[in-house]
Amino acid sequence: MKYEINDETLAIISLADGKSKVVEFNDEYIVNDSPYSVMDYSCKYFGSSLSGRIDGSKNILGSVYKIPVIVEESQKLIFFPTEAINSESVSWISYKNIKSVEKYGKKSLIKFNNGVEVIIDCPYFSLKNQIFRCNMLEAIFSNRKCKKND
């Protein structure tokens, strides 16, 4: 059975052999799909492919490396990659559930709103930049939606 990202999904972490660890509010799973496959399946479930969501984000933010994507818009499910999207070791993090990010040596410690903590092999300043991009994506997207409704 394929995993579908939902509002309790905190992170999709890359493991060896093309598998992923899914971290949710109250549970963790090992799935037999890469983070890319989980993201693509989830985007398709909500009406687009990961490639389509990436194109949409690039249209909003301009061409950006490690671009965040809106997996599902009504729930504001925005995820960002820790590395290049096609990298085998990329992990995806839920933007709306982050409470704080701290340096953890050359890695980073992400603290989520519900108290769950995850160590990510990604530099602190890179994660902070990704969070900023998500903030911009959400703000511009929301602004565009409001203008359409006027």
Image: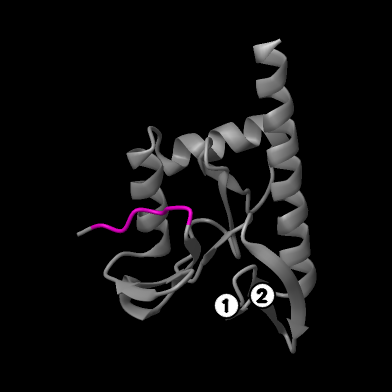
The magenta segment: 2-7
Residue pointed to by mark 1: 116
Quadrant of the drawing holding the N terminus: bottom left
Which quarter of the picture shows residue 143?
A: top right
As drawn, 52 above or below 8 = above
Residue found at x 37% / y 48%: 42
Disc 2/disc 1 C-alpha distance (Å): 6 Å
Quadrant of the drawing holding the C terminus: top right
Query: Residue 145: x, y in percent?
Result: 65, 22
Query: Residue 65: x, y in percent?
Result: 66, 51
Residue found at x 35% / y 56%: 37
> Is 126 placed left or right of 52 in the picture?
right
| Residue 120, visible in the rendered structure | no
Residue found at x 37% / y 57%: 38
Q: What residue type is labelled 1?
A: Val
Q: Which amino acid does label 2 sit on?
A: Lys
| Residue 37, visible in the rendered structure | yes
Marks 2/1 in contact by CB < 8 Å: the verdict is yes
Residue pointed to by mark 2: 111
As drawn, 146 above or below 142 = above
